Structure formats: structure tokens, C-alpha cells
Amino acid sequence: MADKVKIGFVGAGKIFAEYVEGCRGFRTLEIAAVADLDRERAVEQAGRFGIPKALAVDELLADPEISIVVNLTVPLVHAEVSLDILQAGKHVYSEKPLAVSRDEGFRVLRTAEAAGLRVGCAPDTFLGGGQQTCRKLIDDGWIGQPVAAVAFMAGHGPESWHPNPDFFYQTGGGPLFDMGPYYLTSLINLLGPGRRVTGSARISFEERIATSQEHFGRHLPVTVPTHVAAVLDFAAGPVASLITSFDIWASNLPRIEVYGSEGSLSVPDPNIFGGVVQVRRAGSDHWSEVPLTHGSAMRR
């Protein structure tokens, strides 16, 4: 087997453990180092997961053995950190979103192209068995020609469980930037590129109150929309409705459904790699579960 590719992590927060577990599922990858602005946290996580080095960020970027850096910083600085990684001559895989503005995103892509480097970005769950099975069902004509879709991410925000929820309500946060990428990626995977988007958004509450154990009772100022509604027109013709919200206590809405000329498709939660796929074809009086046609070693 070829030599393993050595990777490093910048950012050792809550999502770090899931990434470590995922990377260790690939025999071609070796986790060489972790860096964080909080050096103690980097040391703690390195010890917890048996990672050889806990470094400062500039030390990790200067390490000649590391070829790929995974960017797990807060959304507001994703583009800035990714540019630093590329300028250090390393490939980058970033947590979503790639950037908080189109201009920043294009700058990351142009910098990588000019340097002959690669950029990857979450989410990758559309590669899992659930989403790929749905794509195959559409391609094979199970629901005929897709004409419409709906996608709903309805919850009440992360302040009840996340140890550091502040960034969810600052620039780069909110339900559209936090969870929206999963739903948009799924829709584009299933229906192709979009051609037009219209929408409306609001900040429903100017502050939130944390109820997680670490910050119970602390007030969190809100500076980004927490309820976003959109209509997406796709180049191939379908029209989709999308809602992402941190303002909803409970809902019976589906995660994602695609409606075709010959039936309907129930798509599993796009935040997981597997899930239950169901089809209800024209003339049927019930939904039928479809076995996954694609496997996945990943899980969430």
C-alpha cells in the first residue's frame, strides 16, 4: 500500500471528535497533528485521541510532513484560515460553510487553482447510502420527471446543548449557514443546479438564553436571521421550497421530499449518511421503503 497521507487539524472544538473518527475509517490517512487557538484544548484532544503533535497554528502550517489541513474553526474565519492553509502550500478541507460571502468563497477557490492545490468542503453526507439511493431512484425513473421538492430544517437552536453556542447567532451562523448546506447540497445532488433563488428572513428574537450546562442562563445576542424561507428554481425545471429555522419548537414537516410526474420520494435526513428511503408511486395508497442501493462506512 502507498504511504499514508498525513493530515492536520486546525480547530479542536465539538465537531473535532466526529472528524477524527471519520478520518480513521480511511487506511490512506494518518492524523499527524492538531492545533487550536486554545493550546490547552489542542493538547487535551491530542492526548485523548493519541495524536502525535499538539501545535500552534503557525507550527502546523509550517510542518513539511502535513499535506492536507482540515479547517474546523468558527464559520466567520473559515475563508481566512483556508487561505492561510493554501498559502502554506497545503490542500484544505473546510467545515461548512466554505466562506461567509461569495467574494471570500471565490477567493479561496481562485487561490487554490493558482497554486495547483485542492479545496474540499463539508457536507459530504450526500455521498452516503441514503442520498445516493435517492439519486439512483430519480435517475432510474421511479418517480418520473421531478417537478417540485420541499426541504425543512425546523428546530429551536443549539443553545440548549452546545457548549459554545455564541457563534451560531453571529455572522456566519444562523440556521441557513449552519444546517442549510446539508439540505441545499441534497437538493442540488438530486435535482441539479439552481438558476434562481428568492427568499425572506427575520431575526425573531434579539437575544437567546443558553440552557446548556456550560453557559446556563447566559444571554446570547442575535445578529443573523434565525428563520429563513426560500423558493429555489432549478435549471431543469423543478421548484423547491426551503425553510431553515432556529425558532420552531416542534414540527411534523418532512426533512426532504421530491415530487415527480409518476410518484413521490421521501428523502432521509441529509445530516446522516444512511437513513430510510421511501417511495409512493402514482396510484399507490401507501409508502414503500426502498433498500439502500449504496453502502457507506460512515455514520453520524
Image: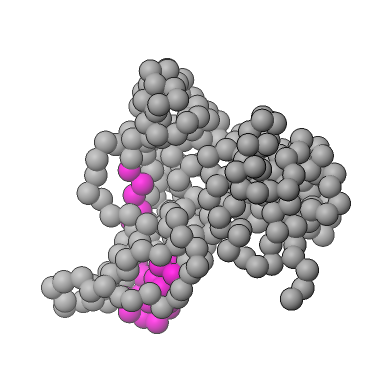
Q: Position of residue 281 (x, y in %)?
A: 23, 76
| Quadrant position of residue 136 | bottom left
Q: Quadrant of the C terminus?
A: bottom left
Q: Image point 20% across, 70% down: which residue?
A: 287
**Residue 265 position by quadrant:** bottom left
Q: Nearer the viewer, residue 262 or 180?
A: 180
Q: Which residues are magenta?
A: 129-154
Count the numbered circles shown.
0
**Relative height, residue 43 to residue 241 (above, below):** above
The reply to whether residue 214 is in sight is yes
Q: Quadrant of residue 206?
A: top left
Q: Position of residue 52 (x, y in %)?
A: 73, 48
Could you tell whether 150 is left or right of 11 in the image?
Answer: left
Q: Is residue 102 magenta?
A: no
- Placement of 83 over or under 262, stated as above or below: above
Residue drawn 33% across and 54% down? 255
At 51% across and 35% down in the image, what residue appears? 173
Q: Is residue 147 above or below residue 226?
A: below
Q: Position of residue 211 (x, y in %)?
A: 36, 25
Residue at (69% x, 67% y) in the render: 28
Q: Give the camera-side residue of 47 and 107.
A: 47
- Residue furthest to the bottom: 140
The answer to whether one can see residue 101 in this image is: no
Furthest residue toward left: 285
Q: Is residue 145 magenta?
A: yes
Question: In x, y percent, where is residue 119?
Answer: 70, 55
Image quadrant occupied by the N terminus? bottom right
* Image position of 120 (left or right of 177): right
What is the basis of the colouring in this image?
Answer: one colour
